[in-house]
């Protein structure tokens, strides 16, 4: 029986980072993945595909130029699914190639198989031909990711009713689309198809969407969605979904109905833990198949078995998953790391983008900290005028007592890139004076930080 210092189950962001980190420490590593290609959910159905789809839509639709040329402007008049998928395949091929090269360069072995725990130091592997082998390990990492939650009451058929993974196999653009679920995935797909001028209805059972984001940012985002014709149904539970004569009728709890050609059900995800045999070794999971893990070391209830990435729950980001994998591998082999920064950026690749770091205004207010806010609207910047940007803004929150930046929140073009300036200032204990005294490239959207800093500085009694 082959023995490894670490066996990693899954080759998504957390799995690949754990494997490469362990290999760089001179350890023997095996990555087990049941997919036909490396990369996991992130590369094949999640992060990379949806973001590639978004970029393709924005380019072909001419969305970014409509501020100048009007809402009817398009780069390509008739956009087909083929146009979208062509770029997607090129991107995925590149991602897989890079990952294979990284594994080869670092001496990481990988095998296509399903894995099942027999004991806390032994795995059973079953390959695609049904051949069974066993491997031993000193440490293991579970990085199996998640899959869309599919309740039995929803008539999924890949023709009229889809989950988020199945949306990538659409054969043609829908005439109308209804998205059930106002979380990150639902909002991203709803706004991407809206940018293609597909009439979209978004249904969310709660009274708000993206409730972990600063409410002022969400309010502006909702306004932009409604302004371009999207129908938003908040506080609306779904009573029934029925396919009828080539369309789908959704009956809401309040008696209203919504009809569209196709429906995307994107209300939650579940851990890909089926068949792993976690109950055999006593690893705890919740009702959605998420694994309980120590937030500092990422150890499960079995100390030499770690779990990271989406399978352990919030924040379910590729960026944080990578860091979780690295931290777990270092802990497994006794490498001491400094404590991580308190804050990390959260990016939502909707149209427009949303990105946030640090505390929201609601969190600062509830903490009792006296604060001041600075705001800069992108249309106030020269770069915004050049780009034809007529919406979006940056919001900075400062402590009045310490002058430190507590939170940065952005909705609009380039939000997920711009947020890193705020992240750096927060984690380096920077103050409002940084933005006032430093020079920013002109013209840039990043100049909004100086405008927002001055806006707050003027109110802080300086």
Image (cartoon, helix red, strand yellow):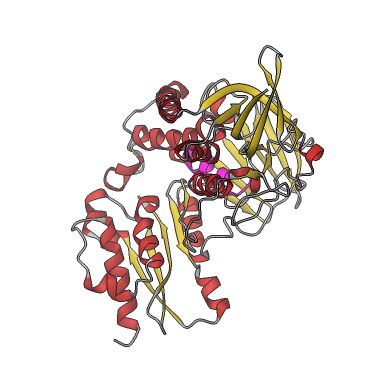
Query: What residue is shown at x 32% (from left), y 69% (from top)?
Result: 452
Q: Is residue 27 left or right of residue 414?
A: right
Name above or below for residue 130 compared with residue 144: above
Q: Which quadrant would residue 90 be assigned to in this image?
A: top left
Query: What residue is shown at x 21% (from left), y 62% (from top)?
Result: 440
Residue at the farthest top position: 129
Rendered-image quadrant of the C terminus? bottom left
* Foreground of the two, 280 or 239: 280
Q: Is residue 346 left or right of residue 267?
A: left
Query: What residue is shown at x 51% (from left), y 39% (from top)?
Result: 22
Q: Within the magenta stretch, is there residue 385?
A: no
Does the rendering let one see residue 196?
A: no
Does the rendering let one see residue 286?
A: yes
Q: Is residue 72 left or right of residue 344?
A: left
Q: Is residue 330 left or right of residue 437?
A: right
Residue at the farthest right position: 280
* Foreground of the two, 355 or 114: 114
- Provide the major secondary structure of the magenta segment: helix
Q: Position of residue 29 (x, y in %)?
A: 55, 32
Q: Position of residue 255 (x, y in %)?
A: 76, 49
Rendered-image quadrant of the N terminus? top right
Q: Position of residue 222 (x, y in %)?
A: 51, 56
Q: Bounds of the magenta span? A: 181-193
* Foreground of the two, 439 or 215: 439
Name above or below for residue 212 compared with residue 318: below
Count of numbered circles on the image: 0
């Amino acid at each position: 029986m082959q023995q490894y210092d670490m066996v990693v189950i899954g080759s998504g962001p957390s799995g690949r980072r754990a494997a490469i980190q362990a290999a760089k420490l001179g350890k023997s590593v095996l990555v087990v993945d049941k997919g036909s290609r490396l990369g996991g959910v992130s590369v094949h159905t999640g992060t990379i595909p949806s973001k590639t789809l978004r970029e393709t839509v924005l380019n072909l639709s001419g969305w970014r130029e409509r501020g100048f040329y009007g809402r009817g402007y398009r780069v390509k008049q008739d956009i087909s699914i083929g146009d979208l998928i062509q770029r997607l395949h090129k991107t995925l091929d590149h991602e897989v190639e890079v990952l294979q090269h990284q594994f080869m360069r670092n001496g990481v072995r990988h095998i296509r198989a399903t894995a099942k725990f027999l004991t806390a130091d032994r795995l059973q592997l079953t390959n695609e031909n049904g051949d069974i082998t066993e491997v031993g390990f000193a440490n293991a990492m579970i990085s199996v990711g998640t899959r869309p939650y599919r309740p039995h009451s929803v008539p999924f058929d890949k023709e009229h009713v889809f989950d988020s993974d199945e949306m990538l196999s659409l054969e043609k653009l829908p005439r109308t689309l209804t998205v059930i679920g106002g979380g990150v995935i639902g909002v991203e797909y709803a706004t991407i198809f809206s940018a293609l001028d597909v009439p979209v209805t978004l249904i969310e059972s709660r009274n708000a969407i993206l409730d972990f984001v600063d409410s002022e940012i969400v309010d502006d985002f909702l306004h932009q969605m409604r302004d371009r014709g999207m129908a938003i149904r908040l506080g609306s539970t779904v009573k029934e979904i029925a396919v009828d004569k080539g369309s789908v009728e959704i009956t809401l709890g309040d008696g209203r109905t919504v009809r569209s050609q196709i429906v995307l059900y994107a209300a939650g995800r579940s851990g890909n833990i089926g068949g792993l045999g976690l109950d055999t070794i006593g690893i705890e999971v919740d009702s959605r198949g998420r694994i309980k893990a120590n937030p500092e070391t990422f150890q499960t209830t079995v100390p030499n078995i770690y779990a990271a990435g989406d399978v352990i729950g919030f924040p379910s980001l590729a960026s944080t998953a990578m860091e979780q994998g690295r931290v777990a591998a270092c802990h497994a082999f006794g490498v001491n790391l400094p404590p991580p920064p308190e804050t990390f950026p959260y990016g939502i690749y909707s149209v427009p983008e949303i990105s946030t770091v640090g505390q929201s205004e609601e969190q600062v207010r509830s903490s009792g900290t006296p604060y001041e806010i600075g705001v800069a609207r992108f249309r106030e910047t020269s770069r915004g005028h050049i780009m034809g940007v007529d919406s979006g803004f940056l919001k900075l929150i400062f402590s009045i007592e310490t002058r430190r930046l507590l939170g940065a929140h952005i909705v609009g073009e380039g939000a997920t890139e711009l947020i890193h300036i705020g992240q750096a200032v927060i984690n380096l204990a920077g103050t409002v004076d940084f933005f006032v005294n430093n020079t920013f490239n002109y013209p840039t959207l990043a100049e909004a930080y100086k405008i927002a800093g001055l806006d707050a500085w003027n109110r802080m009694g300086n």
